[in-house]
Image (tube, rainbow, N blue to C red):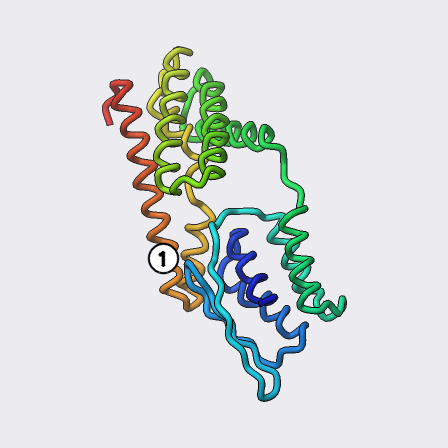
Amino acid sequence: MATLRVACALMEAGARARVAHNYSAMVAVGLGAERHELRIGYGSMDVTVSSGLNTITRMLEVGEKGVNQRLDLEIRALAASMKARGLTPQATVAELERLQRETPQHPVWVVALAVGVACAAFGRLFGVDWLAFAPIVAAGAIGQALRRYLLHCGHNLFVVAGTVAFFSALVGGIGARAAGSGTVGLAMIASVLLLVPGIPSINALYDIMEGRPTLGAARAVTVAMLMIFIALGVWIAQALLGLRT
């Protein structure tokens, strides 16, 4: 269960399947297993560990997948140091729970502001004029705060994506129009760039190339569904503002 929980935690933090497999193997070997086999699915995974004639298999559900690079690196460091630290299975699980609980995160307002600035910066690369820069920052920041709140409340991932896309695009479009921008349409697109599932897309590609087509296809379908809901939210916002799409 210790090696399985490490693998699940890595997947939930945004790691690809090969990383979860390799580092969970480090934990298994560090705890005394002679053989380690891990099957990774999109919603669950199971592991088989063996020592001598003793073999045991366990399964665990994989929770919501996000992106937490700091936690990802902390868990990798824990797995890599198993042999040197001489931890027991119970101590390994306790340390993993401590990392999940105590690994520091940036304040919500810092993340929201950074996301807004990033959206506006990408907007400039796409050709958005300076008049729309501040409205995009505001729209991106509001969208990030709204997304965090809705996900924290447990709402459906795809519904959240569509809802945030609508409000962010609407705020960005109204703000850009009020500021006299000549690139209102582009400003609305830039305002929803925070929703683009970059890491899940890359993980889907890696999983397929590394011999896990089923998992990669499941990730790819999730990415496609997210993009559909994002496009739908932007389209509704543009229709309300009378923009031709």
Tag 1: amino acid: Ala
Which residue in the structure is indicated by mark 1? 218
Within the image, what quadrant is residue 33 found in?
bottom right
Helix, strand or loop for disc 1 = helix
- Residue 113's place in the image compared with 134, above or below, is below
At 32% from the left and 46% from the top, the residue drawn is 225
Within the image, what quadrant is residue 154 found in?
top left
Residue 125 place in picture, x, y as percent: 45, 30
At 61% from the left and 66% from the top, the residue drawn is 2
Q: Of residues 39 and 180, which is closer to you in this image?
A: 39
Q: Is residue 84 left or right of residue 157?
A: right
In the image as oriented, which residue stretches furthest toward the right?
85
How packed mark 1 is, by other alpha carbons closer than 10 Å (few <14, some 14-19, many 20 or more), is some
Q: Is residue 194 left or right of residue 83?
A: left
Residue 174 place in picture, x, y as percent: 37, 16
- Residue 138's place in the image compared with 21, above or below, is above
- Residue 136's place in the image compared with 32, above or below, is above
Q: Quadrant of the C terminus?
A: top left
At 51% from the left and 75% from the top, the residue drawn is 57
At 60% from the left and 53% from the top, the residue drawn is 72
- Residue 60's place in the image compared with 104, above or below, is below
Residue 29 place in picture, x, y as percent: 64, 75
Q: Of residues 84 and 136, which is closer to you in this image?
A: 84
Within the image, what quadrant is residue 25 found in?
bottom right
